[in-house]
Image (cartoon, coloured by chain):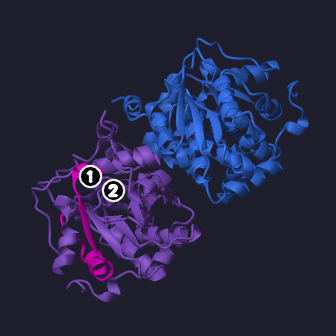
Chain colours: A blue, B purple
Amino acid sequence: MISSAVTRSDLPTVEDVRAAARRIEKHAIRTPLLNSPTLDAKLGGRLFVKAEPLQRTGSFKFRGAYNKISQIPEDRKKHGVVAFSSGNHAQGVAAAATMLGIPSWIVMPKDAPAIKIARTKEFGATVVPYDRYTEDREEIGARLQAERGATLVPPFDDPDVIAGQGTIGLEIAEQCAGVGVKPDSVVVCCGGGGLVSGTALALAGVMPGVPVYAAEPADFDDTKRSLEGGRRVGNDPAARSICDALLSPMPGEITFALNSRLLKGGLTVTDDEARAAMRTAFVELKLVVEPGGAVALASVLSGKLPIAGKTVVVVASGGNVDPALFAQTLGC
Amino acid sequence: MISSAVTRSDLPTVEDVRAAARRIEKHAIRTPLLNSPTLDAKLGGRLFVKAEPLQRTGSFKFRGAYNKISQIPEDRKKHGVVAFSSGNHAQGVAAAATMLGIPSWIVMPKDAPAIKIARTKEFGATVVPYDRYTEDREEIGARLQAERGATLVPPFDDPDVIAGQGTIGLEIAEQCAGVGVKPDSVVVCCGGGGLVSGTALALAGVMPGVPVYAAEPADFDDTKRSLEGGRRVGNDPAARSICDALLSPMPGEITFALNSRLLKGGLTVTDDEARAAMRTAFVELKLVVEPGGAVALASVLSGKLPIAGKTVVVVASGGNVDPALFAQTLGC
């Protein structure tokens, strides 16, 4: 199903993902596909973790941001870029813009983790704070865009951003082939759906027939319900979750148009299950994962997606978590 | 200088390291060489971190253990292996032995981190506890060896173990070439000296002319002082450090014979500098590093080895740290 406002010609293709891979090749980190034999023995299956906390800026968001910003026409570059983000997209945009010599303004929720705000500034951006529950970040972004003549870099609902995130799918396919496995399924963390739609798009092109699932926080399961109902539905504005990276209000038009064609379904995890996955990543993988970055891993560890006898790839999408929250999560 | 009890023919060569690389290829993880552009900007140089916390069993020790154990003659395999270790070697030996279908007994200090003891058991070993400060672990290991007919897997002073650890040096050279850099120096964490001697041996063979340094805790600087004095000297038995992985009493005979020929020198860091490096690894690299695994990184971050305008590779050697200690180290 293609959502009404989006036509098939607006949708990125696997060729767009390949082009994105060429653009980011020398700038993004080809993150490793981690595996813990200890964890596999406990699970009775084979689990591979695409480790995007090790990506430049600490999350996958750099990929889409760089792919988008590097394509801005020369005469528009000096006007800069604007983005609205809970934090990881902010850092990705700030770092990519600075690398390309372009100024950036980032609209960030006031309650974003302090580490994400601080790092966005470090990467060279000007941070514009807003209230996540009373103000419309898209409106603030659009106003800055109009005032400055800057190019908006949407967090997910953009073909170039989606194609950039999709480079993870290409790498997963190559890395799986490198270790001689074909996964039975791939699970990807999902907020607005840019990462999962891009990854599913790439995988459909290069490793067809592998089911791809979106993993979401239990009270932010808009993609799961939208997939089930065949149309985009939003989340309860009163919903809260520890998974700050995944709190978008509803699926994007473009992302849902892709996801409704490409995804097998949605999986949800509680905040406690996300915390448990962060602890497991610490003990077994030595990887720092933030709450929202851990939901795909959590969906497997909590048994939502059975793994016994199977090979499953999960994307750990980011690791930008405040030290105090991380310490608390370790149970200390 | 070759130490009196060791002749040149006892020493492993770069060919032994290459053979080890072939033996472990399908079993060990080719750990990534991490880089943080943010950290580089702060340091004014380029820092690459060989991320051995991501190795099977959470430290580099699996490499040497697998290389050694896989070469045990068939008729001796059923008698098993014995090792004495503060924890990381224990896990490496336990995992390698279990993978090869061989029983293992591990002599471990009673005060080793709980996570290391628990994981050694998980990997299939029988743990034999001892007192680090009043008992001789080598004697206990030798007794078990005699009683069981088992093969001793020394933690560092063994040509096959050293050759296995040296595979890190081959990978560093290949990965540096892959990103088009030649390091100005390489810094490696040092306890008994197996990792640094193997790494230096490999680098001398495949990337000659790059200075290699041993990094040690300030009160366990036996390799630094031995290099300076031209003969093996030990540490004060009363010395203590948070770096539990690096508390060996003096350099090995074989490791020192290699290190005295191959190393540029030694660098020392305080426990507080090791803790600060763990925090930086958490924030900038999203990597869980244990205290002893962080000393090479700490030697650069603390300015002991100036990096401005240079490219330096440090080995982060392990990540097996108790959650409570890690949380405390984050300052929470």
Q: Please say whether residue B98 is visible from this viewpoint.
A: no
Tell me the element at label 1: helix
Instruction: Identify which amino acid the numbered label 1 is placed on.
Output: Glu
Foreground mark, 1 or 2, reads 2
The quadrant of the rendering that contains the N terminus of chain B is bottom left
Residue name at image x 59 percent, y 37 percent: A105
Tell me the element at label 2: helix
Left or right of B322 on screen, residue A40 = right
Position in image of residue B24 (x %, y %): 51, 66
B267 is within the stretch colored magenta: yes
Earlier in the chain: of badge 1 and badge 2, it is 1
Residue name at image x 54 percent, y 19 percent: A131
* In the foreground, B325 or B271: B271
Instruction: Identify which amino acid the numbered label 2 is placed on.
Output: Leu
A103 is within the stretch colored magenta: no
Give the residue at mark 1. Answer: B273
Over which residues does the magenta segment extend?
B249-274
Chain holding disc 2: B
Position in image of residue A235 (x %, y %): 66, 16
Give the residue at mark 2. Answer: B301
Q: Are marks 1 and 2 in contact (CB under 8 Å)?
A: yes
The quadrant of the rendering that contains the C terminus of chain B is top left
Marks 1/2 same chain: yes
Left or right of B88 on screen, residue A77 = right
Residue name at image x 23 percent, y 65 percent: B142
Q: Residues within 10 Å of mark 2 (few under 14, many from 20)?
A: many
Position in image of residue A305 (x %, y %): 65, 31
Residue name at image x 25 percent, y 86 percent: B2
Q: Residues within 10 Å of mark 1 (few under 14, many from 20)?
A: many
